[in-house]
Amino acid sequence: MTERDTPGQTAAGRLPGDLTKDELIDRIIRVDHAGEFGAKRIYEGQLAVLRGKPEAQAIEHMYQQELEHLRTFEKLMVERRVRPSALHPLWNAAGFALGAATALLGPKAAMACTVAVEEVIDQHYRQQSDKLGADEAPLKAKIDKFRAEELEHRDTGLEHGAQQAPAYPLLTGAIKAGSRLAIWLAERI
């Protein structure tokens, strides 16, 4: 926490040029909705390829949690009147393609995809949580809960041999870079 952060009020210590509280909340909900939709599509792509394989059960469990996250942000978008990312069609296609492509490389590559995405999301959710004050405690609690579940997904990927995927450092590095770019775009567009 920086000296200009106020634990009680979200965006209370903002400086000129910083987002207002409403702008910050809109951005958080928009990007998290886009991210959870993208995660849903990644798992749908992986399941399309890996259905019937031993890893499919773990992927299905993670998929069900992502659906819960997505429903939460869909509800928040309506309640808070937040517009979705204009790039929603891109997240639809890119998420499925990433999931299917990594699964086609094999179950370990699919799990490497999960590890890479979830490590970026862990950092992203932590940064969001740190920006929210007590006045946004329910939203902060949801983000913290989802962050813990995303870390479980990362651990599941590691337990299923993600680090044994072909070219693991290259594969995860590329996916992390793409995930960071997707976050940046979804926050703004």
Image (cartoon, rainbow, N blue to C red):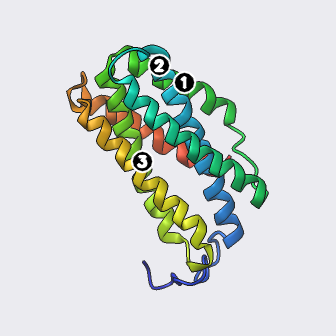
Q: What crowding class fits label 1: few (fewer than 14 Cα within 10 Å), some (14-19), or many (20 or more)?
A: many
The residue at which mark 1 appears reads as 96
Q: Residue at x 32, y 17 (%)?
A: 106
**Mark 2 surroundings within 10 Å by alpha-carbon count, few (fewer than 14), some (14 through 19), many (20 or more):** many
Amino acid type shown at disc 2:
Ala
Res 11 quadrant in image: bottom right
Front one among 118 and 179: 118
- Judged from the image, the secondary structure of the residue bearing numbered disc 2 is helix
Residue identifier under label 2:
100
- The structure residue drawn at horizontal position 39% and vertical position 22%, both measured from the top left corner, is 102
The image position of residue 169, as x and y in percent, is 25, 33
Q: Residue 22, located in which quarter of the rendered image?
A: bottom right
Q: Is mark 1 on a helix, strand or loop?
A: helix
Q: Nearer the viewer, mark 1 or mark 3?
A: 3
Residue 47: image x %, image y %? 47, 21
Say left or right for 141 vs 25. Answer: left
Residue 91 at what x, y percent from top left? 61, 33
Mark closer to the observer (2, 3): 3
Label number found at residue 176 = none
Is 130 left, or right, of 133 in this rendering?
left
Q: Name the residue under label 3.
A: 150
Gap in Å between the C-alphas at discs 2 and 3? 20 Å
